[in-house]
Image (tube, grey):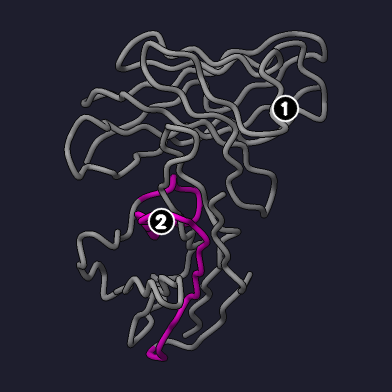
Amino acid sequence: GAVVSQHPSWVICKSGTSVKIECRSLDFQATTMFWYRQFPKQSLMLMATSNEGSKATYEQGVEKDKFLINHASLTLSTLTVTSAHPEDSSFYICSARDRRILMNTEAFFGQGTRLTVV
Amino acid sequence: AQRVTQPEKLLSVFKGAPVELKCNYSYSGSPELFWYVQYSRQRLQLLLRHISRESIKGFTADLNKGETSFHLKKPFAQEEDSAMYYCALMGRDGGYNKLIFGAGTRLAVHP
């Protein structure tokens, strides 16, 4: 199956700094990427959907200026947590799919990034 | 708005027993429904999708539009089925697709 790679797998940063998380599709073109946040023992909460070459669409309650998403190419999307605070500590997961392939609706998931803000 | 409901947080069964993980959805259009599984310390992976009407690892799920359900079933549970199971719905909202998840059900299969 298709592979989605997230980097880094875990990161610790100081409060007030920014952190960038990369999500790459290794063997397919990801025209759509989804970014999720998962709290301990909870489900995946969709943060935003990004389509290659256009601005991301954020879910209600997600701060666009805090969680910057860039999807500049068909294989790379980035999530930047700006001015991170301890409450931003969480597990962030990306997912990608190639929506151009008819009937190919499957989304492939990265391994996730554990962010800890101290 | 689209919504996925998984009423059970935990389902505990013995090996060989039948399993049914419930999933109900709310969506105004034609939904695309999936079951994803997450084994311990592994990433989320697709188990099955309704358009394929397939059986994977003995699991099946039938879309019931009348009841807006997509329950996951397996006649005889195995210990290796122990994992977190998420029901997911791909729908269109405001002109773009979004994939949302239910709360998840932890399946524990005991020997």
Q: Is residue B27 above or below residue A49?
A: below
Q: x and y percent of residue B37 in the render?
A: 42, 58
Q: x and y percent of residue A103 in the render?
A: 19, 45
Q: Is residue A46 above or below residue B15?
A: above
The numbered disc on residue B32 is none
Magenta span = B16-45
Q: Residues within 10 Å of mark 2 (few under 14, many from 20)?
A: some
- Towards the viewer: B93 or B20: B93
- Towards the viewer: B103 or B40: B103
Residue denoted by label 2:
B36
What residue is rendered at 22% in x and 42% in y? Answer: A104
Quadrant in the picture for residue B18: bottom left
- Towards the viewer: A33 or B106: A33
Tag 1, which chain? A
What residue is rendered at 20% in x and 67% in y? Answer: B54
Q: Residue furthest bottom?
A: B17
Quadrant in the picture for residue B65: bottom left
